[in-house]
Amino acid sequence: MSAPATIVVGYVPTPEGLAAVEYAVDEAQRGQARLVIVNSGVRGYDSDPSFASATDLDALADRLTGLGIEHEIRQATQAISPAEEILQAATDVSADLIVIGLRKRSPVGKLFLGSSSQQVILDAACPVVAVKRPD
């Protein structure tokens, strides 16, 4: 019997981050996969708006537990980038899939997908799904 799939999700408390979590939850329920949620401020700064509060993470954990989804939530405080945190988590757990959220960008911004998103997509050893927030 093989182990269940593992999905790593890059989470930030934004509509894009929530869209990534929703996609991953749907995938986890479909394939009985385990989720590893990764949240990190920029360079580990807990004052950064992308660093989720304990209340946000507790609510997310409660929801996943209520849905019967095996999960782990990692909130990194090291001084590495969010992309590196996601990629390291994916390596640590031998992820089968990474899910990240993307935000809309200006025409100039579209030239540079976003440094974190681009790094995850280019450097991941497994497939990456980039989810846009619902309009």
Image: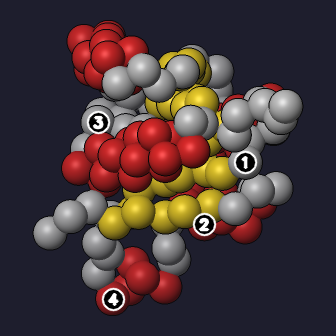
Q: Secondary structure at mark 4?
A: helix
Q: Earlier in the sequence, mark 3 or mark 2?
A: 3
Residue 107 placement (x, y as % from top left): 33, 88
Q: Which residue is mark 2?
A: 118
Circle 4 Cα neighbour tier, 10 Å, few/some/many (<14 / 14–19 / ≥20): few
Q: Earlier in the sequence, mark 3 or mark 4?
A: 3
Q: Earlier in the sequence, mark 4 or mark 1?
A: 1
Q: Which residue is mark 4?
A: 107
Q: Which residue is mark 3?
A: 13
**In the depicted structure, whether residue 39 falls above or below residue 119:** above
Asked whether residue 37 appears in the rendered view, the answer is yes
Circle 3 Cα neighbour tier, 10 Å, few/some/many (<14 / 14–19 / ≥20): some
| Furthest-left residue in this view | 135
The amino acid type found where label 1 is placed reads Asp
Measured Cα–Cα span from mark 3 to mark 4: 25 Å
Q: Quadrant of the N terminus?
A: top right
Q: Secondary structure at mark 1?
A: loop
Residue 60 placement (x, y as % from top left): 32, 22
Q: Nearer the viewer, mark 1 or mark 2?
A: 1
Q: Secondary structure at mark 2?
A: helix
Residue 109 placement (x, y as % from top left): 39, 78
Q: Which residue is mark 1?
A: 96
| Quadrant in the picture for residue 53 | top left
The amino acid type found where label 3 is placed reads Pro
Q: Specify whether 41 is left or right of 70.
A: left
